[in-house]
Image: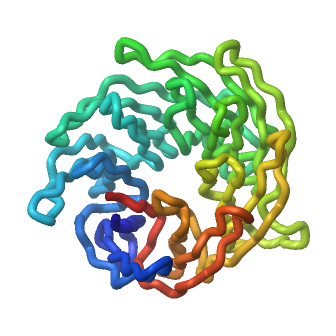
Amino acid sequence: MKLLIGGYTKKNATGIYQLPLIKSDNSLQLGEAQEIIRIGGPTYFVQDNDLIFSINNTGNQGGISSFKLSNNNYLAQDSYLTTGSSPAYIGINRKQKLLYTANYHTAVLAVFSYEANGQIKLLDSIKHTADTLGPCPEQADGPHPHFFDQTPQGNLVSCDLGNDCVDFYSFEHNHLNHLAKYQNEAGFGSRHIVFNKDGNYFYVVGELSSKVNVVHFDEQNWTFTNIATYSTIPEDFTAHNGAAAIRISNDGKFVYVSNRGHDSITVFAVKNDHTLELRQTVSTFGEFPRDFNWDNEQKFVVVANQNTDNATLYTRDGNSGCLTPIQKNISVPEGTCVLFCN
């Protein structure tokens, strides 16, 4: 098990960094970050065994690139780059060997296939249109898909910050087909989404509203019921905040959201009726936490603070869901993506 953190490369960062995990009994400490892949702007990346697929921003081009581990070194394998901005998100289907990207700036969703040697091939893409743009300044210039990945039943789902919506697609015979849309409230800023274990509820986080919306849905008939909406920040916090990552524990009992501005992780307990109850709001001990993640057993959580070039390590209590910081000020530059991997 190892920890990888990547992000922007606008200041001192040069790519993806590996931080050694130093374990003793039930404790864990992170060692010094070392660059393992030199690449421009790896703001999101995924892994399949010895392969890493990363967002790549190089000069006037953006896209994705693959790297393969060989003799303890990651070697560049293939890239798919086009003129313009790079995607904001990359998802992976390891069983079918597919990659999914969402481009915030160009509004393009894309599906790629990949081979065991890291070769990447574009299969299909679709561009969002400005159908339901929200009222916020960040939404005025058009649609902004920020997430594209699988649903519980193997369809695809995107979150569009510009259009305040969640769109669902099928992908058959290498072709994307729009199936349904769930509309969030105006100005919500739909960013990322997670599903419960049974696949009949989802929790979508709004970046612009700093809220989580709980929705019951039927993936066979494409019906949606808006259940409840919760703030991710305290009522008395009036400064700017942008909600970012959302994750749900494997047992489905807890939902976690990072807050950029309030600089915290908010922990919700999932009640029996799938509504949420605030359990904890804990500092990230740095500024602008875009992403956080946990190890396979979900005993440890790491959050990366983009603006202060540091990360924080927590233990996670599986019974209460609460996080306890055990290591602060871990030096890592411009981190926006955190991944525990084999």
Colour scheme used in the picture?
rainbow
Instruction: Left or right? Give the position of 110 relative to 81.
Output: right
- Is residue 112 visible from the viewing direction of this image? no
Question: Among all residues in the image, which is located at the extreme left?
Answer: 71
Question: Which quadrant of the view contains residue 21?
Answer: bottom left
For the C terminus, the quadrant is: bottom left
Answer above or below: position of 173 versus 54. above
- Residue 147 position in % (x across, y down): 54, 42
Please name whichever residue, 116 or 198, is drawn nearer the observer in this view of the structure.
198
Give the residue drawn at x 39%, y 40%. 92
Answer above or below: position of 23 versus 102. below
Answer above or below: position of 137 versus 321. above
Give the residue drawn at x 40%, y 32%. 110
Question: Among all residues in the image, which is located at the extreme right?
Answer: 236
Answer above or below: position of 262 versus 119. below
Instruction: Left or right? Give the position of 9 relative to 187.
Output: left
- Is residue 252 visible from the viewing direction of this image? yes
Give the residue drawn at x 67%, y 27%. 131
Please name whichever residue, 191 or 218, is drawn nearer the observer in this view of the structure.
218
- Residue 86 position in % (x across, y down): 38, 48
Give the residue drawn at x 24%, y 65%. 37
- Residue 238 position in % (x across, y down): 84, 71
For the N terminus, the quadrant is: bottom left
- Residue 341 position in % (x across, y down): 36, 58
Instruction: Left or right? Give the position of 323 relative to 25.
Output: right
